[in-house]
Image (cartoon, rainbow, N blue to C red):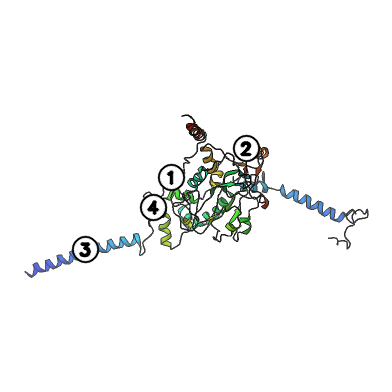
Amino acid sequence: MSLARLFCHAALLLVLALSATAQASESGVAQATTGRVAKPIIEPARGDKCVEPAQDMRRNHMEYLKHQRDDTMRGGIRGAKYSLKTCIECHASQTTNSVTAAPTNFCISCHSFAAVKVDCFECHATQPASKSVSFMPLGHPTQAHGVLSNLRRQFQNLAPLKP
Amino acid sequence: MKPESPTPCACGKNACDETRPQPEQNSRRNFLGIAAAGMAGIMLAPGVRLIEIAQAATPAAAGASPKVRWGMLIDSSKCTPGCNACVVGCQTENGLPTQPGPTDTQYIRKIDIKEVRTGKTASLPMMCQHCAEPPCVDVCPTGASFKRADGIVLVDKHTCIGCRYCMMACPYKARSFVHEPLTHQKPDVPRGVGTVESCTMCVHRVDRGEQPACMVACAAAGYNAIVFGDLNDPASEISKRVAQFSTKQIREDLKLNTGVRYQGL
């Protein structure tokens, strides 16, 4: 009887000990991945490769952008390596199509983590240009629109004279 | 160095200091000249000279060229009262409010004018005249208002503090202030609260080799009242027409040498 009870206690202890070690190992893995502070979620970009290595971009992107903005704005030099427009075209979220719309989107995620206010988007677009919007619907290189609307206007002028 | 003569050179005299031979200075000048010529040609390595490295380091970036002066010629005899195509084209291109209130942004607006004595009326678009001597640039306290090398007058919104001094200085009422925070701007046309803005002559299109939206819209409406081009290039259409026809600058008395000219006023 006492022997049976002893076995029972031993089995219970064993089970408890095993479960305790399992818990410890689980929590240890979790800490290794996240640490004490939640890391920013970096959404994958659309392109293959950034213009500079990620480490360099994390530290210096603001310098690159600031340097080039004056060349573009004042000097009219377009299409250089570091352009905010191309950054956004590549890094806009697959779900929101923006770099700032959701807290997990590319720019806002890291800037919230680092507690650095980002002023760019008070003026600059946060979404890449959509093809339908960038198309200029009013004109055509052949000026066929112009000829047609001219004709239409002339017929409109003629119309009251006919009856 | 030889001390200067106490009396200044009396011109016309044969015995003038300047005409007297100065072997000491001449030899030094010769030496410097030879040295400078030598420096330019110094070979760093076989076939490599400093001047070639410097030339290679500055790429031929196709920016705004000072040889170009972009301008517009507006034929007010072709411009029709009631037509708003250029305004709509501008709003579409730049993402501007389509029904602007009195304090909202407008880059281009239509005005109808009438000469009181004769009763002759004219309709014309009015926008930033892209002056060669822009008063808005003169008064800007931060240097945000500036003229590009190719004559386009712009606002650098990175440095604009929104004081609106340029708006008061402009004789054409061309500039607007953004009072409210904006969203959904065009990627090519950044606009933001607290800054002044005006017609950019569609600088993003011009840099791509295209023409301003107002001109395209006017041509699409069949009027062809706006001609855009390089005023410095004698072969361009605008230069030919400016040479052929009598054109006017608005407020020519201010001598601002505007880039936008009007025909048939």
Q: Callout 1: helix, strand or loop?
A: loop
Cβ atoms at labels 2 and 4 below 8 Å apart: no
Measured in 3D between alpha carbons, the distance from the residue under mark 3 to the one under mark 1, in whole angstroms, is 55 Å
B64 horizontally vs A2: left or right: right
For disc 1, the marked residue is A130
Q: Residue at image x 57%, y 57%? A: B167
Q: Residue at image x 86%, y 56%? A: B24
Q: Disc 1 residue type? A: Ser
Checking the image for residue B133, the label placed there is none
Q: Callout 2: helix, strand or loop?
A: helix
Q: Earlier in the sequence, mark 3 or mark 1?
A: 3
The chain carrying label 3 is A
- Furthest residue in direction left, as rendered: A1
Q: Callout 4: helix, strand or loop?
A: loop
Q: Earlier in the sequence, mark 4 or mark 1?
A: 4
Q: Mark 2 or 1, which is nearer the eye?
A: 2
